[in-house]
């Protein structure tokens, strides 16, 4: 087994260490105060998703009696769960400490969150008026007997529960807070003073349960297994996905968290009705941080400016272009590096294609869209003006399933041909293609292509927050390969025998084999070998073994791995020639780059794929070769900047922890 060799670690523990890295940004005094609060919110959101996805899967394995050993740690599902449940309370304590520190410093800066016990009589009166006039009638309130289960809970928001003073049997008060309520009540006075709406509801909960009196009241949040496909369906059609999302609401609970430690009666009720072990119930000081965005909007402009990052203004690559974008792209390949560059170049290209009489077809794969995407507007316009628009819209994009269903309906109604990916493989690749058709004198139809390949989603919001690469090329070999791939995705035949999309490297067809071939090519060079990879996650056993073998042969392996990393570098006799860097900062490191060799021997790809089994074997992913020397130089410089970052970069140690980089 791989774990016996001592250079790997458990995936879940690695992820928890990564999320702790996120939390460290809340303790970094060089980060603006409000951004430190935002990092706490990101930590909490990440942990919630971790329970919904990873812990839910482990609980399923454990319930089924699955005693399969994790190859990278030697742990069963039960052992992994025990370790996770041991680590999470400590992380929550660290989060609470960070939250208390940041809140005290925000108060010193004039942004003061008041607890109910801190309210004077006038402030309490204002809060009661707000509760009576704005909040009370919009709450859904239920009184539950001890044998009643909790109502169906929406995981996207918290709820409030009280133990009621009842003489004959245990009774519980349950409050459903609608999403439409404001999350903050501002108060007059010196500085920016505010109270959270959930605290106001708790303060006046006694008015909601008459004739009962609340004895103890808590905000709670429940995480459920988020596997939407469920059952036997693949959930890659609209009907299957809608059924799967309905099933998700009734899935087993993975954890419950409350803003205080409930008494024995309430804990017993949770254990009985949610089938939760005591260790799956966690306590923290604040559960829901969705108020942070609303708080930022309400802050006076001067205060907000002093507490947040300076506005980042990305470079608009469309400035200075003589003529149109289509003509420019036909002359040379163009790279956008988000968020240093804006998404305007790609959006402008898509807009020109939608209006151009020379364009016959637009094709695109969509995984996640922004709330009000211009991309969708241009696709809809193109379809309504008679162009063929093919949209491969992946319904199984976890937590965006409902949004994607809604966009599928809108795009279909506008005349776009919408495909839901393939039955067996989730379509995670980021491809867009503009097709030009012309008729020769002999009547034959000639097709030419502009192809765009990205490492990240077609999402204008995340393009301003995530580091990603977008390559636009008029290379007709790449265009023909992408055209074949689009057709095969739409006909669900990507993985059929003898499919080829060269020069693109495509999972699940040949990506695993090609990456292994290139790693082994460098391994054979020994000390002259060079591998430089930037990804989000590294978990695949075969890739880990190949990289270890490269290290043992003397090949220099440099890696930037943002999150999960199951390979441990610097282990004597195994991975001494591997150095792995992690960076957490203002922008989320999201781009994937693979570089093998150096000089004239260098091979470079940008890709949508991480080195995970799911990416290499269960998803349609694309890696595109970078042929332009100038673009290669630019990507290499981006990689080098991240790898050498002394401020936000950390080095992964042989024990799985991270250390500050030393000059």
Image (cartoon, rainbow, N blue to C red):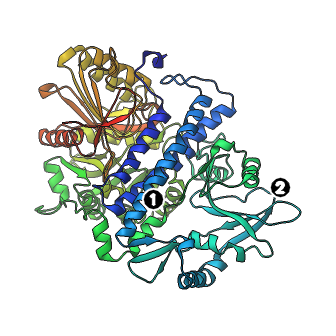
Residue at label 1? Answer: 100
Residue 138 x %, y %: 64, 76
For residue 18, the mark is: none
> Residue 635 lies in what quarter of the image?
top left
Give the camera-side residue of 72 and 460: 72
Residue 202 x %, y %: 63, 70
Q: Can you see residue 458?
A: yes
> Residue 627 lies in what quarter of the image?
top left
As displayed, is residue 299 above or below residue 537? below
> Residue 60 lies in what quarter of the image?
top right
Disc 2 packing (10 Å; few <14; some 14–19; many ≥20): few
Query: Looking at the image, is mark 2 or mark 1 nearer the viewer?
Result: 1
Real-space CA distance between mark 2 and mark 1, rounded to the nearest whole angstrom: 38 Å
Residue at label 2? Answer: 147
Mark 2, secondary structure of its residue: loop
| Residue appearing at x 66%, y 73% in the figure | 139
Disc 1 packing (10 Å; few <14; some 14–19; many ≥20): few
As displayed, is residue 112 above or below residue 505? below
Q: Can you see residue 180?
A: no
Q: Would residue 613 appear left or right of 569 to someone viewing this image? A: right
Of mark 2 and mark 1, the one earlier in the sequence is 1
Give the camera-side residue of 244 and 217: 217
| Residue appearing at x 53%, y 73% in the figure | 118
Cβ atoms under marks 2 and 1 closer than 8 Å: no
Mark 1, secondary structure of its residue: helix
Residue situated furthest right in the rendering: 168
As displayed, is residue 122 above or below residue 594? below
Residue 321 x %, y %: 12, 61
As displayed, is residue 521 above or below residue 355? above
| Residue appearing at x 34%, y 62% in the figure | 33
Residue 383 x %, y %: 39, 62
């Amino acid at each position: 087994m791989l774990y016996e060799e001592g250079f790997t670690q458990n995936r879940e523990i690695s992820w928890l260490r990564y999320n702790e890295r996120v939390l460290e940004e809340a303790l970094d005094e060089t980060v603006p105060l409000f951004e430190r609060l935002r990092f706490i919110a990101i930590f909490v959101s990440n942990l919630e998703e971790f329970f919904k996805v990873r812990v839910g899967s482990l609980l399923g394995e454990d319930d089924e009696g699955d005693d399969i050993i994790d190859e990278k740690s030697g742990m069963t599902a039960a052992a992994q769960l025990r370790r996770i449940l041991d680590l999470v309370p400590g992380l929550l304590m660290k989060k609470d400490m960070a939250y208390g520190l940041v809140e005290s410093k925000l108060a010193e800066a004039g942004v003061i969150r008041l607890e109910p016990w801190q309210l004077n009589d006038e402030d309490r009166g204002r809060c009661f008026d707000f509760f009576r006039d704005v909040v009370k009638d919009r709450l859904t309130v239920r009184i539950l007997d001890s044998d009643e289960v909790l109502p169906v809970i929406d995981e996207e928001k918290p709820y409030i529960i009280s133990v009621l003073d009842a003489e004959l049997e245990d009774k519980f008060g349950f409050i459903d807070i609608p999403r439409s309520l404001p999350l903050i009540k501002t108060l007059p006075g010196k500085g920016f003073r505010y109270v959270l709406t959930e605290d106001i509801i708790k303060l006046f909960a006694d008015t909601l349960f008459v004739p009962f009196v609340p004895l103890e009241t808590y905000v709670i949040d429940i995480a459920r297994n988020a596997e939407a496909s469920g059952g036997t369906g693949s959930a890659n059609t609209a009907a299957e996905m809608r059924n799967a999302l309905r099933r998700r609401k009734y899935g087993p609970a993975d954890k419950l968290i409350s803003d205080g430690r409930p008494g024995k009666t309430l804990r017993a009720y949770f254990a009985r009705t949610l089938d939760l072990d005591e260790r799956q119930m966690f306590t923290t000081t604040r559960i829901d941080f969705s108020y942070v965005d609303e708080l930022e909007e309400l802050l006076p402009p001067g205060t907000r400016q002093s507490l947040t990052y300076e506005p980042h203004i990305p470079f608009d690559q469309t400035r200075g272009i003589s003529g149109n974008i289509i003509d420019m792209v036909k002359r040379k390949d163009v790279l956008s590096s988000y968020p240093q560059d804006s998404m305007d170049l790609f959006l402008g290209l898509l807009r020109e294609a939608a209006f151009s009489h020379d364009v016959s077809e637009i094709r695109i794969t969509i995984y996640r869209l922004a709330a009000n995407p211009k991309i969708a507007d241009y696709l809809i316009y193109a379809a309504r003006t008679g162009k063929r628009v093919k949209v491969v819209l992946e319904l199984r994009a976890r937590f965006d399933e409902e949004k994607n269903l809604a966009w599928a309906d809108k795009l279909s109604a506008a005349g776009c041909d919408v495909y839901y990916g393939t039955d067996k493989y989730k379509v995670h690749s980021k491809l867009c293609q503009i097709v030009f058709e012309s008729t020769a004198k002999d009547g034959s139809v000639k097709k030419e292509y502009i192809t765009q390949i990205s490492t990240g989603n077609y999402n204008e919001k995340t393009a301003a927050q995530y580091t990603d690469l977008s390559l636009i090329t008029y290379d007709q070999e790449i265009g023909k390969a992408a055209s074949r791939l689009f057709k095969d995705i739409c006909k669900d035949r990507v993985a059929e025998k003898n499919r080829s999309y060269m020069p693109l490297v495509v999972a699940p067809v040949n990506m695993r084999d090609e990456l292994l071939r290139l790693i082994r090519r460098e391994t054979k060079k020994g000390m002259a070998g060079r591998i430089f990879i930037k990804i989000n996650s590294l978990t695949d056993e075969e890739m880990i073994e190949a990289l270890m073998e490269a290290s043992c042969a003397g090949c220099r392996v440099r890696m930037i791995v943002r999150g999960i990393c199951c390979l441990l570098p610097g282990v004597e006799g195994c991975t001494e020639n591997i150095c792995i860097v992690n960076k957490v900062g203002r922008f989320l490191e999201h781009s994937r780059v693979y570089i093998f060799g150096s000089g004239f021997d260098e091979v470079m790809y940008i890709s949508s794929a991480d080195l995970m089994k799911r990416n290499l074997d269960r998803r349609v992913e694309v890696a595109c070769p970078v042929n332009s020397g100038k673009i290669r130089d630019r990507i290499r410089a981006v990689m080098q900047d991240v790898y050498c970052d002394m401020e936000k970069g950390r080095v992964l140690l042989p024990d799985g922890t991270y250390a500050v980089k030393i000059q």
